[in-house]
Amino acid sequence: MEWIVLAVIVVLALMMVMMYNRLVALRQTRNNAFSDIDVQLKQRYDLVPQLVETVKGYAAHEKQVFENVTNARAQVGAVRGGDPSARMKAEGLLGGAISGLLAIAENYPQLKADQNFQRLMDELSDIENKIAAARRFFNSATAEYNTATEQFPAVLIAGTFGFHKEVFFELDEAEKAAVHKAPEVKF
């Protein structure tokens, strides 16, 4: 009888260790996914001054837009390495400011024809695609992690060892509005 009780205790202990290790692995996958996003966001952050300078050469009187981009970039720099939700919000503001900058370019055909501007736009487009892919992977890893922390019996271990629900990397309000806005079609 003692052996049966001891065997049950050992099996339960092994199950707890396995669940704990799975939660640790899922959390690490999520953290690595955020690091992948961070790399792409850093590339975009570094590209912004070049883009601003190129547009400034053609549209120097668009001072407000340049200030918006500069302020948004400064906010990203201020929250770098800090709270992920504040970081996500700042990155959303920078994305919106970049969109405003690119909207100006539509009014300047000479700017759109500039080879340096075209190269920067291609680079920005590539970076934005990589950010979107990294964001999808991060959100998938976050969903898997959150599901694992909320399922029984892992929820008991999650609560005991400080595994808590994490936030997704979502679009900010300006990005959501742009996605849900019907495109203008001109004939």
Image (spheres, rainbow, N blue to C red):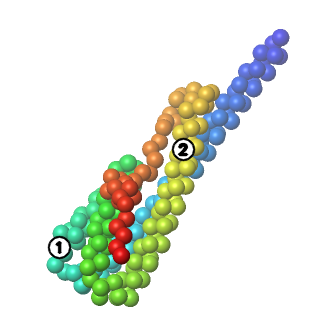
Q: Which residue is depicted at the point 34% across and 55% down?
A: 177
Q: Position of residue 74 (x, y in %)?
A: 27, 63
Q: Nearer the viewer, residue 171 or 87?
A: 171
Q: CA distance from mark 2 to mark 1?
A: 42 Å
How packed is label 2: few (under 14 Cα within 10 Å), some, or many (20 or more)? Answer: some
Q: Which residue is depicted at the point 42% across and 83% down?
A: 119
Q: Which residue is depicted at the point 42% across and 64% down?
A: 41
Residue 20 in view here: yes
Q: Which residue is depicted at the point 22% across and 70% down?
A: 65
Q: Position of residue 140 (x, y in %)?
A: 55, 49
Q: Outermost residue toward the top?
A: 1
Residue 172 vs 65, above or below: the answer is above
Residue 63 disc label: 1
Residue 182 disc label: none
The amino acid type, in three-letter code, at marker 1 is Lys
Label 2 with label 1: CB-CB less than 8 Å: no
Q: Position of residue 163 (x, y in %)?
A: 52, 36
Q: Outermost residue toward the front?
A: 187
Residue 167 vs 122, above or below: the answer is above
Judged from the image, the secondary structure of the residue bearing numbered disc 2 is: helix
Judged from the image, the secondary structure of the residue bearing numbered disc 1 is: helix
The amino acid type, in three-letter code, at marker 2 is Ala
Between disc 2 and disc 1, whose residue precedes? 1
Residue 50 vs 169, above or below: the answer is below
Quarter of the image containing the N terminus? top right
Residue 175 in view here: no
Quarter of the image containing the C terminus? bottom left
Count of residue discs: 2
The residue beneath circle 2 is 143
Task: Find residue 175 and report its image quarter.
Answer: bottom left
How packed is label 1: few (under 14 Cα within 10 Å), some, or many (20 or more)? Answer: few
